[in-house]
Image: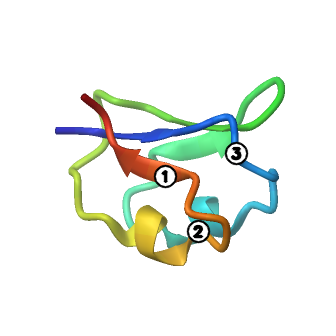
Amino acid sequence: MAYKISESCISCGTCEGACPIGAISQGEETYVIDADACVSCGACADACPVGAIAEAE
């Protein structure tokens, strides 16, 4: 299951650099994850300093 970035995102960009496949990009207000490209490795969630990333439900 793909990961999702919540409203808690502070737009620091750490997750984008942590994603090994480049599935994360800057959105209008926060970073966003391309659910079709996400391989659910969890690297972004581990890297997020504010815990704004979790598996989508």
Circle 2/circle 1 CB separation < 8 Å = yes
Rounded to the nearest angstrom, the CA distance separating label 2 from label 1 is 7 Å
Residue drawn at the location 58% of the way across and 68% of the way down: 48
Of residues 31 and 50, the one nearer the viewer is 50
**Disc 2 element:** loop
Task: Identify the amino acid type marked 3.
Answer: Ser
Q: Mark 3 points at which residue?
A: 8
The correct choice, above or below, for 21 with respect to 49 in the image is above
Query: 36 left or right of 20?
Result: left
Residue drawn at the location 30% of the way across and 43% of the way down: 38
Which numbered disc, 2 or 3, marks the residue that appears first in the sequence? 3
Q: Name the residue under label 2.
A: 48
Q: Mark 1 points at which residue?
A: 53
Total numbered badges shown on the rendered structure: 3
The correct choice, above or below, for 6 with respect to 36 in the image is below
Query: 44 left or right of 29?
Result: left
Q: Coloring scheme of the render?
A: rainbow
Of residues 8 and 36, the one nearer the viewer is 8
